[in-house]
Amino acid sequence: MTIERREVGTRMSKIVVHGDTVYLAGLVADKTRGRSVGEQTGEILAMIDALLAQAGTDKSKLLQATIWLQDIRTVDEMNAVWDAWVVPGATPVRACVEARLQSPALMVEIRVIAGAS
């Protein structure tokens, strides 16, 4: 099986495709850095949509999601944005935990794995 890497950097790739599986790197907000967890989640989910499209798939093929929150007490706000974004009936397995992120301005990081179309 071939391994295809996209948006390759010196430290990591943003997308890796192996067989019928698409792996995305953990993503954090850029434009909404320092703002609410809801705003950051919305920005990250839009980034996920774009990267999945670049890999030829979409959120209806999500298999797994891992979400790290700077403060677990913000989970309801994050979930409101997440729930409006996911495809009903096609939700992935998911873990959501509290973790210290790279900067206090980052409220959430999300990584997903999806099936290829």
Image (cartoon, rainbow, N blue to C red):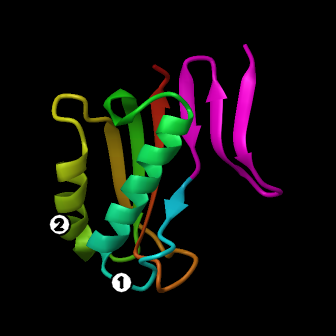
At horizontal 33% and vertical 43% (from top left) the residue drawn is: 94
Q: Quadrant of residue 74?
A: bottom left
- The residue under the point 46% across, 29% down is 57
The residues colored magenta run 1-25
Q: Quadrant of residue 88?
A: top left
- Residue under the point 54% across and 82% down: 103
| Residue 111 can be seen in this image | no
Q: Is residue 50 above or below residue 9?
A: above
Element type where label 2 sits in the image: helix
Residue at screen point 41% across, 45% down: 49
Residue of label 1: 35
Residue 26 at least partly seen: yes
Front-most of 71 and 82? 82
Q: CA distance from mark 2 to mark 1?
A: 16 Å
Q: Nearer the observer, disc 2 or disc 1?
A: 1
Is 81 colored magenta in this rendering? no
**Rendering coords of residue 47 (x, y %):** 46, 54
Is 44 situated left or right of 23 in this image?
left
Please check the rendered image and state whether residue 5 is part of the magenta-colored stretch, yes or no: yes
Q: Amino acid at mark 2?
A: Asp
Question: In the rendered view, does 35 fall on the left or right side of 4?
Answer: left
Q: How many marks?
A: 2
Callout 1 amino acid: Arg
5 sits left or right of 20 in the view? right
Q: Which residue ends up furthest to the top in the rendered image? A: 1
For label 2, the crowd category at 10 Å Cα-Cα, with few meaning under 14, some 14 to 19 and many 20 or more, is few
Few, some or many residues within 10 Å of mark 1 (<14, 14–19, 20+): few
Q: Which mark is residue 76?
A: 2
Compared across the picture, whether 10 is left or right of 49 comes to: right
In the rendered image, which quarter contains the N terminus? top right
The residue tagged with tag 1: helix, strand or loop? loop
